Image: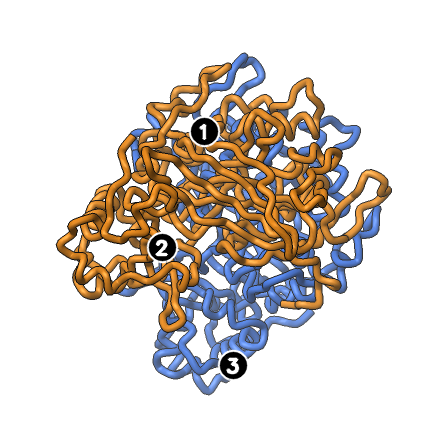
Chain colours: A orange, B blue
């Protein structure tokens, strides 16, 4: 475990900032006077990479990397350039840097910046790779005898999701309409979802592309970084639609990600192993090193106009499959993987029922209401509730964080077709 | 039913060409001396839209539409421009056209052209919307008592598929590796697929985008046109992985589409209704007019170096749900639909067991081998087999066709990870 690296940006040197020099996460920000551009969070500030490149301070390639409002151009270059960029940023922003004088003018206070999607999402896949979550959901839907599907211990099962539904933190989410068939209904109806939920996940971002099957080691090298990811889920729509083709409109409303891409390099000090296996994995999916991370993740629920309650806290180290294993599996049939592909980890749930990453589990399918600090209770999300995901890894005297991944649920439209197209 | 429209391009005036003036399908082609560009098929020729625009002959908007090697810029403009473009092309290429002299120099023989993907695929969704197919598959996998899932008669169920796996006709398809568990296996293994299959489908292309739920009528207006679509399927991989999250690597190898986008306008004379319903659809999914089409579709199988056998012929009018109904359903949860989204109809199968759109059904899960005209038999696709989809609608003295949608299956790689990334 490395120590806190010192920066000449004072606010980066506290043990509690999420953005010390050890982190250097990548985002896209705008200010009142300037369009979205690439930046790196450092303490309370953002270092403007576009400006640094234009002025010649930041030059790690023969062509411009920061002339677009997304990180895809950096992502597609691969690990050698990623390392060179991180080294140079560490140099520029580090204590005693020769570049401090010029770099000072390239800092923007985070409080004055508006954050945007940090990368262009190519395609989005969501996995189901946490054993506690899979056992909880399996028990709720199929009974406690065989909660895990037969394939679950052998492959990180997942489904293709909708890239177009990705939104940045802070975007409001409208409660969806959908076709549902409630327990007492004799026929389905078209109605607003009554069981709208969050899912606490991490999203792994594919940097370099592939065109054919890749090993777990190769997959690991392809991963650029991670974001927090809330896969909003309408449980009643999902329950009616999901057999036999999987989730579709129940997951189509929105998926929110956090604004900062925390790189694999920043997470390396927190690497840890996947759990021991009941059943050995086939060779092509076996771990070759520690590829999970010890990251504390939590969810806060804030009813409109009231205080927030942290309703769950758990850890990403509880996953059964790493993102590298997911990506390796994703590539087996030979289809290409692209720069900007996003892989959702699947809901992160701890062993204890208070450590679950969804209201479905926390309220045990709506049967055990949560009591909030305001005295109110919740089984699923109510209109006006703000859901905030947070993630932090703790080093020796420093914290690597993701920034908040937040969204507020708005009431369903009175007439869903009024908005038109 | 309209009659054959006469063109000054002689080859467009036969009853058997797939590309009379009535069709005017949109594609992207290149020639030995020139890069991919937009063109329209007319008889044995391609009319070069890019050249026509540059020279001022074709001008239906204030900005260039054909300066990119795809039709997305036209697609996003919407029905008014689509109609204006079709009118102008009909005028230019029609018998007695004032533009014949200048347009003659803008024709390229189709035989000299290489075809490319006609549009940039945004996202790809595949449906399961043919009742014969769903009943066949349900009978094979779950028994004849309840072959249809409970939701099937109420929603056009579908799953998100992989846009990156789309390839143009003529692209070879390598037999995939994957995790499979065969009936005699006690544990899964990683092996080349032994049950590699095609699926005969039509793909509907979303032209104009939406941002919220759309009605069936609005959805119909959003559809730009149709292509043939072969959703290559590894049945053994699919069988092991698909519960509970749906198809994933079993469908990830490749999906082939035909080179020409046949517009909704060209298909209008062949419009027909969806079937009578056992159970009425909810209001938001009900048909408001004929939105299926009477299109004959077939599949040919050509073993390497031998003659082709047409192994199935059926009709797109056998679908239970139209593309407009699928798109309306797709939008219900509020997620955006984008220019370039592709909706696979689902496998098209007729009532008769000889009219099925997959080998899974034609060979009844491998138990009834097909006998080819060469004397060979097939249960699933063998290495070297070329699979060709065709589609034709028959007017009074004319044919509207899609061009061939073809692909040859190559042997699996000896070592799937040899290709690397």
Q: Tell if the residue under mark 1 belongs to the same chain as the one under mark 2.
A: yes
A304 vs B310, nearest the viewer:
A304
Residue nearest the observer in this picture, A179 or B328: A179
Q: Which residue is mark 2?
A: A44
Of the residues tagged 3 and 1, which is closer to the observer?
A: 1
- Residue B17 on image: x %, y %: 52, 62
Task: Tell me if mark 2 has few (under 14), some (14-19) or many (20+) residues whose alpha carbon lies within 10 angstroms of its own.
Answer: some
Is residue A343 something one can see in this rendering?
no
Chain letter for mark 2: A
Would residue B112 appear left or right of B343 to someone viewing this image? Answer: left
For label 1, the crowd category at 10 Å Cα-Cα, with few meaning under 14, some 14 to 19 and many 20 or more, is many
Q: Residue at x 39, y 78 (%)?
A: B53
In three-dimensional space, the C-alpha distance between marks 3 and 1, rounded to whole angstroms, equals: 66 Å
Give the crowd class for mark 3: few <14, some 14-19, many >=20 residues within 10 Å: some
Please tell me how many numbered marks the rendered image carries: 3
Q: Position of residue B93 (x, y in %)?
A: 48, 77
């Amino acid at each position: 475990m490395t120590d806190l690296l010192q920066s000449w940006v004072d606010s980066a040197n506290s043990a509690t900032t999420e953005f010390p020099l050890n982190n250097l996460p990548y985002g896209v920000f705008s200010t009142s006077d300037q369009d979205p551009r690439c930046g790196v969070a450092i303490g309370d500030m953002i270092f403007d990479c576009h400006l640094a490149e234009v002025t010649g301070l930041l030059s790690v390639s023969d062509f411009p990397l920061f002339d677009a409002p997304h990180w895809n151009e950096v992502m597609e270059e691969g690990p050698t350039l990623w390392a060179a960029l991180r080294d140079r940023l560490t140099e520029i922003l580090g204590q005693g840097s020769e570049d401090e004088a010029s770099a000072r003018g390239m800092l923007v206070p985070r409080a004055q910046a508006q954050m945007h999607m940090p990368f262009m999402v190519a395609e989005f896949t969501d996995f189901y790779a946490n054993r506690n979550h899979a056992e909880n959901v399996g028990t709720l839907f199929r009974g406690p005898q065989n909660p895990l599907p037969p394939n679950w211990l052998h492959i990180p099962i997942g489904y293709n999701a909708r890239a177009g539904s990705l939104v940045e933190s802070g975007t409001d989410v409208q409660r969806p309409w959908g076709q549902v068939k409630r327990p007492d209904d004799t026929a389905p109806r078209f109605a607003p979802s009554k069981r709208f939920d969050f899912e606490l996940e991490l999203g792994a971002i594919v940097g370099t592309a592939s065109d054919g099957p890749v090993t777990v080691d190769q997959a690991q090298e392809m991963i650029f970084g991670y974001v927090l990811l809330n896969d909003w889920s309408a449980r009643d729509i999902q329950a009616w639609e999901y057999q036999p083709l999987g989730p579709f409109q129940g997951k189509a409303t929105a998926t929110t990600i956090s604004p900062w891409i925390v790189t694999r390099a920043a997470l390396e000090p927190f690497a840890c192993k996947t759990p021991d296996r009941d059943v050995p994995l086939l060779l092509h999916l076996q771990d070759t090193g520690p590829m999970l991370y010890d990251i504390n993740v939590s969810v806060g629920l804030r009813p409109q106009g009231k205080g927030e309650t942290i309703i769950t806290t758990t850890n990403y180290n509880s996953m059964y499959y790493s993102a590298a294993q997911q990506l390796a599996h994703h590539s087996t049939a030979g289809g290409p993987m692209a720069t900007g592909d996003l892989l959702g980890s699947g809901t992160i749930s701890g062993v204890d029922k208070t450590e679950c990453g969804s209201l479905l589990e926390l309220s045990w399918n709506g049967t055990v209401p949560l009591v909030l600090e305001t005295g109110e209770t919740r089984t699923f999300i109510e209109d006006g509730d703000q859901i905030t995901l947070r993630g932090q890894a703790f080093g020796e005297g420093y914290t690597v964080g993701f920034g908040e991944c937040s969204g507020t649920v708005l009431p369903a439209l009175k007439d869903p077709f009024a908005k038109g197209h």
